[in-house]
Image: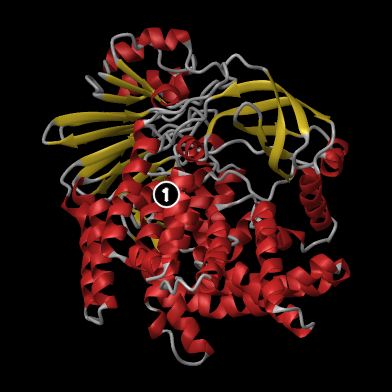
Amino acid sequence: MSFSQKLKIILQSKYFIFISLFLALLYVFITTKVIVYDTKYSLDTNILTGNVVSYTIDGNKLNMLIKAREKVQVTYYINSLEEKEYLQKELLIGQKVVLEGKITRPYQNTIPNTFNYQKYLYNNRIYVTFSADKITLEGKTNFLNKIKSDFMKRIDGVGSSKAYLYALILGEVDYIDGDVYQDYQKNGTTHLFAVSGMHISALVLFLTSFFKKIRVPLFLTNIIIVLFLFFYMFLIGFTPSVIRGALLFIFLLLNRKLKLHLKTVNVLYILFLILIIINPFYIYNLGFIYSFLTSFGLILFSKKIKGNYIQKLIKVSSIAFLFSFPITVYNFYEINLLTIINNVIIVPFVTIILFPLTLITFLFPFLDPLLNIGIIFLENISHFLNYFQINLVVPKVNFLFFILYYIGVYFIYKGKWKTIFYLIFLVISVKILPFLNSNTYVYFLDVGQGDSTLIVGSHGNYAMLIDTGGKIKFEQEDWEVRNKEYDGASNIITFLKSLGITKLDLLVGTHGDADHMGEAINLVNNFAVDKVVFNKGSYNDLEKSLIQVLEKKNIPYFQNLSEINLGNNKFYFLNDKEFGDENNNSLVMYTNMEGFKFLFMGDAGVEVENYLREKYNLLNIDVLKVGHHGSKTSSSLEFINWISPIYAIISVGRNNRYGHPNVEVLNNLDNSFIYRTDFNGSISFILNEENIFIKTYEP
């Protein structure tokens, strides 16, 4: 028996697969969970020197990854158009840079079930971030990095279609307009912009056809393609999905040349083992997970992918959807059930027309207007498809769901197609779990220097949001405007969906300041809302803009309400007097839930507090949402002593410029248990049968 035959028997043996998988996962667990890694830098570091690994310039913001003693993520805000043009021209991959600024540890997610930036960086072996105040470029770069930089600068010079050259060639989506990219997210086609197997296959097919036409020998063709793939991986930055796509082609080529005759699925498995041994943190990379799972599914069901082009495309899209479904709902809590159809419509256009045209435009930039026509067509199709969304919201699932789901997929592979009903039942079971929960929840969400409180009734019979958070937006010059702006509402929407909430029964705007209602329009545009309540007084510009959206969507809104019923709870609006300013006109809300008294003060000040003392009997409050972020204009000692709160919640931004909360207010609350969103992150109160449990989500 030859060596290749022995190797084939070993590599395809079930014993080898099970033992190697167990050992590999044990190795991953030890190296990523047992061993703890930390930065080599002191947190007092204010000067950093390193080499640029990658960077993006979006509006007035430069994001940069540098390699110094370790990898560090850098943020720098550009001061002028001249400086931006200088950086776009002179900044190079691999170049040495000297940075002055402040080093910090990245924060965890303080709203549960949302993106954990600290964990994301840690899994990419990045332990600190650096806020730069000054950047000095020094020296040049090496030959390969010069090529990569020239590649990027050539794209920069293409014209209006450069965002799609970055996306389709380099997998860099930051340059695509945020609203446009959100459309792709909603219709489930963002995978087209993550360079992966599809792009690799298209490039390999093009190169193979080209070399065949000019009669290059097959052996030489394969060598050239392999060298090209290694260069392309370097160009992209060795992202897990492109590594999987490129190395799978190379491994399959070696499989044929060495006459191992291994099944494709075994080759994929060996590649998986090698990659997680090289970098065990790949196992937490979404691109890596999606790439291997969908590839595994397509290989497993390859014999069933038959028919004409459209039939094959439908089957491929369906299989990819089937295998990626639990990963999508675990991370995003929502999936568009029309994703399969959307891909059948969009994928052919991108792969057959737009992607090749993108490559040609890179070589011949004068074709930019033609490519731009294709881009406009794609964006319009994507936007049109979003009118026909059928979104399925699935609350946070655990590991058992994955096991049960993929057991079902296994039976489908075995030809038991009725198992699809088992998968539907499994998803329905997960969806109804929140309705079996008898607890009432009150979440004081960390939205920075703003307010937002979510109340979820027993058995999920209602969901109410008091304020949305938000930040003041300043006028910017054209060069400062970014394609990707932080959307504070997205975290709230994600969190709501992770709880299985599909609509808000009530949205309350305590008043029209941006830090309380700044994200209301985003929420209403992205989430079902039953009704909205405003405070007294005339509407400001922010409220008027929101009302226009509400009227367009036929969402009823109210003003001057005294009370409202939700589920078994009654909520009272106490501030029925119009004062002279927006803060004092804040809605003040009182409710008794599960025997606990809650008082929400908005931004109401001492004048309102005195009015409440004259009109109501608000003794022995259990939970106070402190007024105006702990400003000295509210929470007077007389008022605090009168209501005697057991717990005081202060919603405030970290290191805010207003100095909130005020020391005097903290002293006034000395007899209460104080929770602050800047220290404690989001704070949840869990109420059940006159018991109260408190959980915090520290940054």
Residue 391 x, y percent position in the rendering:
40, 66
- What residue do we see at 23% from left, 51% from top? 460
- What residue do we see at 44% from left, 61% from top? 292
- What residue do we see at 68% from left, 40% from top? 53
Q: Is residue 574 visible?
A: no
Instruction: Give above or below for 657 relative to 355.
Output: above
The residue to which callout 1 is attached is 283
Residue 681 x, y percent position in the rendering:
40, 29
Disc 1 residue type (three-letter): Ile
Residue 6 x, y percent position in the rendering:
37, 66
Q: Can residue 339 be seen in this view?
A: yes
Splitting the image into 4 quarters, where does residue 243 fall?
bottom right
- Residue 557 as seen in the image, left or right of residue 362: left
Instruction: Give above or below for 253 relative to 504.
Output: below
- Residue 20 as seen in the image, left or right of residue 114: left
| Residue that sits furthest to the left in the current view | 689
